Image (tube, rainbow, N blue to C red):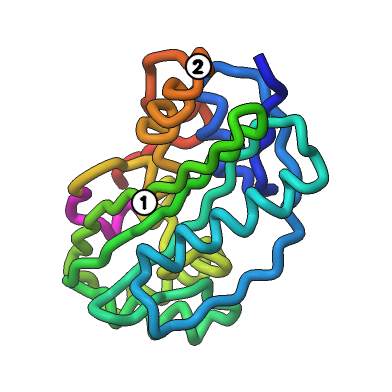
Amino acid sequence: MKHIILATTSPRRISLFKLLGIPFRAVDSRYREHFSKQIPPEKIVRQLSRGKATAVSRRHPNAIVIGADTVVVYGKRILGKPKAKYKAIAMLRMLNGKKASVITGITVIVPQRAKINSQTVTTRVFMKQYDEDTIRNYVATGEPLDKAGAFAIQGHGRRLVKKVVGDFNNVVGLPVKTLGKMLKQFGVPVVPFYGRPPNITKPRKR
């Protein structure tokens, strides 16, 4: 089997990829993200995932390379990663009681077949109604910072979510079920289990 590289340094994506049960390396893509907000988010994530995978493939031309990119969309707005608490508070106020879409683009580059396969996966996330104290207490944990949409469903942010329609792992950062099917098409033997990784647990109710 060809050497496999995941173009990321994200601990969440690395942990999720381990569910596939295949050896791999995680490599920083060093890709500088740029895109036009005038194009659909599905096209944006495909473009960014392909850019990451291509950047790593150029440095490792004999490896199978996987790139991924995830955005959170509310209405027509793409919600990025808040770098400050006040921005996280604003995002969580916006999402209060509302529905958002988590969209991930995945690109697999298989050099020996000269193949590039890109797909997108969308999961709907329905947020609970929560009060201002809940928002501020959650932001005070620091968890929402540097998380797209200002919440981490694999952590304390799960308490703000009413329900998820679609792939839970996609909301964490990598839809491994879809990725596993993509890799199988290229003859990569993956395990048929796509649950939550061992170190990503649902927080206990208090």
- Disc assigned to residue 142: none
Q: CA distance from mark 1 to mark 2?
A: 21 Å
Q: Residue at x 30, y 54 (%)?
A: 159
Q: Residue at x 40, y 40 (%)?
A: 175
Would you place residue 124 above or below residue 131 in this image?
Answer: above
Q: Residue 77 in magenta?
A: no
Report the amino acid beneath label 1.
Answer: Thr
Q: How many residues crowd around disc 1 within 10 Å: few (fewer than 14), some, or many (20 or more)?
A: many
Image location of residue 29, percent across then percent down: 72, 53
Image location of residue 90, percent across then percent down: 39, 85
- Which residues, given as a range, are shown in magenta? 158-164
Would you place residue 99 above or below residue 8 in this image?
Answer: below
Q: Which residue is mark 1?
A: 120
Q: Is residue 161 left or right of residue 89?
A: left
Q: Residue at x 32, y 71 (%)?
A: 73
Q: Which residue is mark 2?
A: 187
